[in-house]
Structure formats: structure tokens, C-alpha cells
Amino acid sequence: MSLSIRNQIPGTVTAVTPGEAMATVKVRLDGGQDVTAAITLGAVKDLGLAEGSAVHTLVKSTEVALATGPVEGLSIRNRLSGTVREVATGAAMATVRVSVQGAELTAAITKDAATDLGLAEGSAVTALFKSTEVSLSAV
């Protein structure tokens, strides 16, 4: 199946913590960074997720925020350190490709945000996205 979601990063489930209706699933990306997904218990069951399961983490580029300074005091669980590889700026929006350990993420942000942050190739950034915005695909 082909998907329009730009960010599809392989990894391995390291923990599944079930709740009443939802579960948190921790995934170690192939590059060594960790991502948390908050998905339904039904999805955990349907995908057969357990520790050691191979998955792809899926995050829409519009759900990825970027920070150029210290990130503190946020409830956002997923914070991946990386380096800007490319900034493509249009009239209103910018697409920013970020290298993270062993993978690449794309963030779709406003042109003004890219300018205000001074994003350019080689800039150090932190990519941020909520665990509720992460989908998982079994491999």
C-alpha cells in the first residue's frame, strides 16, 4: 500500500502500555531515537503489536513542529534532534527536510515560521510531534 504520509520511519516496539481504550506504544527507531504513539487498544490487537514487533511510525508532515532552541515544559512526548538538510520555501508554506539519526523527517511549516527561526541547511533543530499524531503500520 502506498501512502501520502511523508514520514514513514522503521523501528521496533519496545513497550506497549494498555489503558482502558487507548495504549501507548514505545518504538525504538532504527537510528536509536525513541517515539511514543498513542493508539487504540483495537489497533494494538489488530496489528498484533508486542515488544519486538517491527513497525513503521507514520507522521504527517503538517503535524511536525520545529524548534531551534531548548525545549522545556511541553507535554509533547516526541522530540527528535536533527539537522536541516533542505528548506524549500513557497509563497505561504515551507517544506523542511530534517536528518535525524538514521532517518529523515519532513515538516510542513509556514514560510514566516521558517524565516523567523532562521532555518537553513545545517541548522540544528528539534522535531516535535504529539504521540496522538503518530500512526503505526506493522511490517
Image (cartoon, helix red, strand yellow):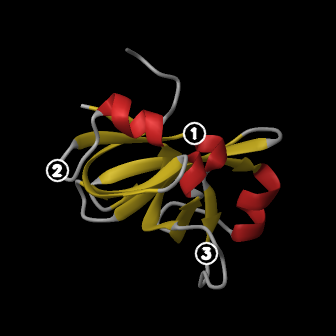
Q: Could you classify mark 2 by the number of other residues whose Cα lies within 10 Å: few (under 14), some (14-19), or many (20 or more)?
A: few
The correct choice, above or below, for 9 with respect to 35 in the image is: above
Query: How many other residues sit within 10 Å of disc 1, few (<14), some (14-19) or many (≥20)?
Result: some
Cα separation, mark 3 vs mark 1, equals 20 Å
Asked where in the image residue 99 lies, by quadrant, the reply is bottom left
Looking at the picture, how far across and down is residue 22, in whole percent?
52, 49
The label shown at residue 60 is 1
Residue 104 tag number: none
Residue type of the residue flagged with mark 1: Lys
- According to the picture, the residue beneath numbered tag 3 turns out to be 68
> Which of the two discs, 2 and 1, sits closer to the camera?
2
Answer left or right for 129 relative to 3: right
> Which label sits in the foreground, 3 or 1?
1
Percent of width and height locating residue 21:
55, 46
Q: Nearer the viewer, residue 96 or 139?
A: 139
From the viewer's perspective, is residue 132 above or below residue 113?
Answer: above
Residue at x 62% of width, y 85% of height:
72
Considering depth in this image, is 1 or 122 the residue closer to the camera?
A: 1
Q: Earlier in the sequence, mark 3 or mark 1?
A: 1
Residue 88 showing in the rendered view: no
Which residue type does callout 2 highlight?
Gly
Q: Is residue 37 among what the camera can see? A: yes
What is the distance, in whole Å, between disc 2 and disc 1 at their CAs? 24 Å
| Amino acid beneath label 3 | Thr
Label located before the other in sequence (3 or 2): 2
Q: Residue 52 has which mark? A: 2
Q: How far from the left and from the top, in percent, is residue 52?
A: 17, 50
Total marks placed: 3
What is the spatial separation of the Cα atoms under label 3 and label 2, in whole angstroms?
A: 33 Å
The answer to whether the residue labelled 2 contacts the one labelled 1, judged by CB atoms less than 8 Å apart, is: no
